[in-house]
Image: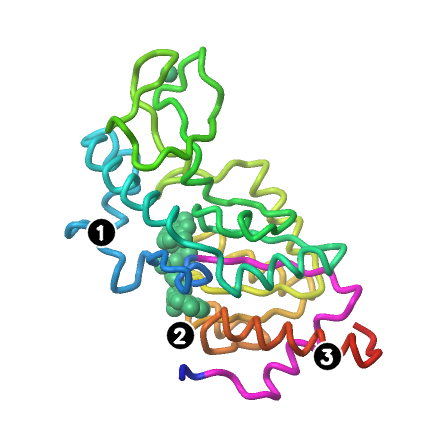
Amino acid sequence: MPNVPSSRALDLLADHLTANARVTVLTGAGVSAASGVPTFRGEEGLWKQHRPEQLATPEAFARDPRLVWEWYDWRRQRIAACRPNKAHEVLAAWSERYTDFTLITQNVDGLHERAGTHNVLRMHGSIWEVACWTRCAGSPLRWRDETVPLPVIPPRCSHCDGLIRPGVVWFGEAIEPGILMRCREATRCDVFLTIGTSAVVNPAASLVQEALERGAYTAEINLEATPASSLVDHALRGPAEIILAAVNERLGRLCGSGGSR
Ligand code: NAD
Ligand code: ZN
């Protein structure tokens, strides 16, 4: 049985999640770990001896598009075989429960959407989208492609016959300004939760700080300590899928007993 926070710690978080709370959640690879999607920094992060930071860059793609696409094809196959876990399910339920709810995710796997979550802001794009590498005039900015496995690697643009690339934001690339602006707006909230992210990559990490400055109650759910742990009001140590299920159960009980949530 993994370590889980005390009952009191879970109550404390549930107490802040009142019916009218404006809730913003930031998620990272940790929420998908229980579904079987490897995190980057975990033991399974390596692929054929390559570190993700060496593959998920425009330079790596320019150098060896086949290698980068082989890695993405492997990840797409793996993710396609995974299902949303309890963490995704609870967050999807909260996206219905709270009128003002935003889920900001760094994940590209699409599991929040598959769980039925409303109002998802994808900071780093989607592994299920692709774009023309040269952004040729005939092609849309990006389009959906859920074919697994890919029949031809590297895949080609049907408009210019050049390369297409995964529709994700790589290391060293900028987050879409419109998305970033909406993420920043969402830090104006009552409760800001950061879940399953190592919180080392900016601007995701700075969102916690912004939420704090704007007066939100902030909490972190993670297996281990991160740079955000010392910033937040409340750090809960343990698996997201177990902690979220336990907090959600408390919310249900409080509702059922005629509580104010
Ligand atoms: P990360 O790999 O850097 O960190 C994962 C974090 O999750 C760690 O802090 C770890 O302690 C925690 N964690 C692991 N299992 C957990 C669990 N069951 N419950 C709670 N916490 C758990 O991931 P990151 O911070 O999201 O940054 C990596 C970048 O790589 C992201 O920007 C993302 O785009 C990309 N990425 C995405 C996926 C995905 O879509 N699922 C997977 C790997 C990496
Ligand atoms: Zn093209």
Name the residue that disc number 1 marks: 51
Please state the horizontal and vertical placement of residue 248, each as a whole percent of the image.
64, 72
Instruction: Name the amino acid, label 3.
Output: Arg
Vertical arrangement, residue 28 with respect to residue 118, above or below:
below
Kind of residue at badge 1: Arg
Q: Nearer the viewer, residue 119 or 252?
A: 252
Residue shown at the point (59%, 59%) measured from the top left: 25
Q: Earlier in the sequence, mark 1 or mark 2?
A: 1
Whether residue 227 is visible:
no
The quadrant of the image that shows the N terminus is: bottom left
* Residue bounds of the magenta highlight: 4-28
Q: Quadrant of ligand 1?
A: bottom left
Image height of 109 relative to 33, above or below: above
Residue 120 in the figure: left or right of residue 1 = right
Query: Label 3: which residue?
Result: 253
Residue of label 2: 224
* Element class at badge 3: helix
x and y, in percent, of residue 125 in the image: 47, 40
The answer to whether residue 105 is seen in the rendering is yes
Of residue 69 and residue 84, the one placed in the foreground of this image is: 84
Precedes in sequence: disc 3 or disc 1? 1
Does the numbered disc 3 mark a residue whose Cβ is under 8 Å from ligand 1? Answer: no
Residue type at mark 2 is: Glu
Q: Is 109 left or right of 253, judged from the image as shown?
A: left
Q: Nearer the viewer, residue 60 or 156?
A: 156
